[in-house]
Each structure stands twice: as C-alpha cells, then as structure tokens.
Amino acid sequence: TAGITGSWEDTSRVYHGFVRSTSGVFTSFDAFSPATVNPGIEGYGTAGIAINTAGTITGRYEDASDESHGFVRAADGSFTIFDVPGAGSCPGDKRSFCGTAPIAIDTAGDVAGTYIDGSGVIHGFLRSASGTITTFDAPGAATTPVAGSTAFVLGTAGISMDDSGNIAGTYVDAESAEHAFLRIANGTITSFDAPGAGTT
C-alpha cells in the first residue's frame, strides 16, 4: 500500500486533501486554489477519497458554486481534473455534492464513482486510466425526479471497485426503495436485495 488519503479542515472551514505515507509523513494538497472558494461554508475545498498501490489518488473538490469536480493526483503530485459529461447544476435543495464525485480507484488507475445531473438525479460512472468515461444506470433505477419521493437522491451510486473492474453500489427506484447492484467489467448489471429488506 502507498498510504492513506483523506481531507482536513482549516480554521476558515476550507477543506484540503492529504496523503499519509506508510512511514507516517503527511503531505497536504489542493486540487485548485482555496482562494476561489467561499470560506465559512461547509464542504468547500479538496477531499482525497481513495488511493491505489501506486500512490495515485482520486477525489473531488467543491468550487465556489457548491459543485463538485473530480480529480486524479499522480504520485508525483500532478493533477488531472475531470467532469463527467452530463454532470450539472442541481436544484437548490440538492446542491450538496452536486457534480462529479469519484469514490474508488483500482491499481491500473481506473476511477469509479457517481455524478449528479441537472435534475438532481445520481448516476454511476467509470473513468479509465486513459480518460475515457462511461456512464451507467442500474436497471430499475429512477432516472427522473418523482413527485413526493422521500429519497435524498434518485438513481445509481457506484460505491466500490476491484482490480477486475467490477463495480458495486446501490440504486433507488421510483418507489424510493434502495437496492444493491454489481456491475461486472463487461457492463452487465445484476441487482439484488438482502433477505428481509423492504421493497416499498
């Protein structure tokens, strides 16, 4: 392992990413200038989310418009910033984490995560190490806002990925029920529910 990554908050309530090496050395980083954020508002700044064995980090930063953008930080400290096509400005009640949110990175440098579109619906994505982005929705996932829905967000959330490119996560259907899914590397998605889980 190359260490751990995460984020820390300064006295202005701006977040910064960090990597802690296996020997205990901390290095702080920002995906963009903290001067472009609005101090005092929770969530602004940079968050390291996942690190692979090569020391490559993926994460997100939140800009002054409260929208999230993805990044890949190589072991040498260089950054690649990216947005998933379709990620956009969200309605006012769903602003938090709107945009692109990487969650996992494999040994090859492929990144999986979620993005939220302009309607506030969440979708999954896979970004290859070369930069190609593939988006996906689990079959049965609600992809348009539903009147009266109690779900915080509707749609598909990619949460974890292994080195074979398999992605696991959850999705919310039109009845606000949450289900689990597994998307294998060829794109086939299988959904499942734990025994006893509610379905409505």
Image (cartoon, rainbow, N blue to C red):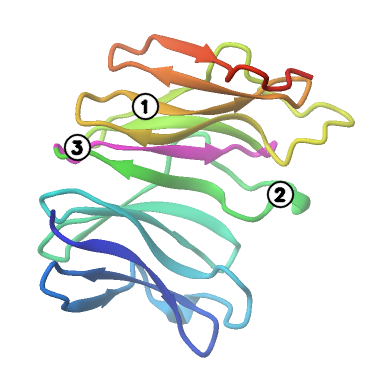
Q: Which residues, given as a range, are shown in magenta? A: 108-120
Q: Nearer the viewer, mark 3 or mark 1?
A: 1
Q: How many marks?
A: 3
Left-right relation of 168 to 86? left
User: Residues under labels 1 and 2: Cα distance?
Assistant: 25 Å
| Mark 1, residue position | 167
Secondary structure state at the residue bearing disc 3: loop
In this view, which residue lies farthest toward the right? 148
The residue lying at 10 percent from left, 51 percent from top is 54
User: Residues under labels 3 and 1: Cα distance?
Assistant: 15 Å
Q: Is the residue marked by circle 2 packed among few (<14), some (14-19), or many (20+) residues within 10 Å?
A: some
Q: Earlier in the sequence, mark 2 or mark 3?
A: 2
Three-letter amino acid code of the residue under disc 3: Ala
Foreground residue among 196 and 151: 196
Secondary structure state at the residue bearing disc 2: helix
Q: Residue 3: give x, y in percent of width and height.
A: 18, 62
**Marks 1 and 2: CB-CB under 8 Å?**
no
The residue lying at 57 percent from left, 53 percent from top is 97
| Mark 3, residue position | 129
Foreground residue among 40 and 167: 167
Three-letter amino acid code of the residue under disc 2: Lys
Q: Residue 173: give x, y in percent of width and height.
A: 69, 20
